[in-house]
Image (cartoon, helix red, strand yellow):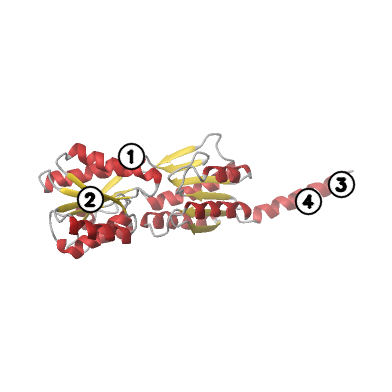
Amino acid sequence: MKKTLVLAALALCLALAATAGEKLRFAYSVMNFENPYFTLVIRGFEERCRELGVEYNTVDAKYDPAVQYNHIENFIAAKYDAILVSPIDVDGINDICQQAIDSGMIVCSEAQFFECSQAKFTLDEYTYGWAQGTEVAKWINEKLGGECEWALIAQDNVAPVVRRGDGVVEAVAKFAPKAKLVSRQTGDTPEGGMRIIEAVLQQQPNVRVIQGTNDSGALGGYRAAMNAGFAGDPTFYVGGADATDEAIAAMKEEGSIFRMSVDLAPYVTGRQCADKMYEYLKNGPPAEPEWFWFPMDPVWQDEVKAGKWPR
């Protein structure tokens, strides 16, 4: 009997040792690799995974809900330890993510969130848009006497982000009521933003303010406006959101009219996501989901040029 117990204890110790020696595996389904915001989230996530000794697999859903759904199915089949998702369709993805949780996996969300995610790294979309619109109105009032025609490059292809665009529009209407919105179109990639603003400037030549609900689309609008001859115009405004490396670089260019972005600290968020996934695997997930809200910090071209960014 004693020999049997000793052998059983030895087998358990060997099993635990083997488990301890196995690397944890994290997977991340990203909304779109081409979005500069997610480039920074990915960088932070992957760097932190390497520091923690975690294997990782980061995949691009290309703004396709069906592709992202397949990602989650594949992660479950491959028995990853934890999944991070920046969801495209928050309702359509919830059931498959619940299956992952039921199988013993940790599931967290980043940017937008879905109901079952155990940690939600997110923002209030309308508040984020309002923060952008407040800065747009400030420019209109200070540089354009409170009156202008303006255009919005939106992300209305992602259902939760529609409210971000609404926040921009309603903040401008409140704080610069004489400004006229002449275009709201979806184009949250540089190519899409450029295509939209090229057409807008032909059809609405009096536009002097362009705001993108992210930097990606805004950068395309910026290139279109620069190509149209507005480089160096002290009153022309292009603004974005996310304070990506590409947007900060654009602010520094000769004759730049890229004036403002809003920092959400995406690199830091990526690191925090990896930390929280690791913590939940070591200590168990919380009884109720945890919420982590992004900061919203306006970054103006003047402080970038003065070397005051990053702070």
Residue that appears at 21% across and 41% down: 172
- Binning the other alpha carbons within 10 Å of mark 1 as few (below 14), some (14 to 19) or many (20 upward) gives many
How far is disc 4 from disc 3 in space, using C-alphas?
11 Å
**First in residue order: circle 4 vs circle 3:** 3
How far is disc 1 from disc 4 in space, using C-alphas?
56 Å
- Binning the other alpha carbons within 10 Å of mark 4 as few (below 14), some (14 to 19) or many (20 upward) gives few
- Residue to which mark 4 is pinned: 11
Would you say 292 lies left or right of 208 here?
Answer: right
Circle 1 or circle 2, nearest the eye? 2
- Residue to which mark 3 is pinned: 4
Residue type marked 2:
Ala
- Residue to which mark 2 is pinned: 151
167 relative to 190, above or below: above
Q: Is the Cβ of the residue at disc 1 closer than 8 Å to that at disc 4?
A: no
Residue type marked 4:
Ala
- The x, y position of residue 251, in whole percent, is 23, 58
Residue type marked 1:
Tyr
Q: Which residue is most to the right?
A: 1
Circle 1 or circle 4, nearest the eye? 1
- Residue to which mark 1 is pinned: 126
Q: Is the Cβ of the residue at disc 4 closer than 8 Å to that at disc 3?
A: no
- Binning the other alpha carbons within 10 Å of mark 2 as few (below 14), some (14 to 19) or many (20 upward) gives many
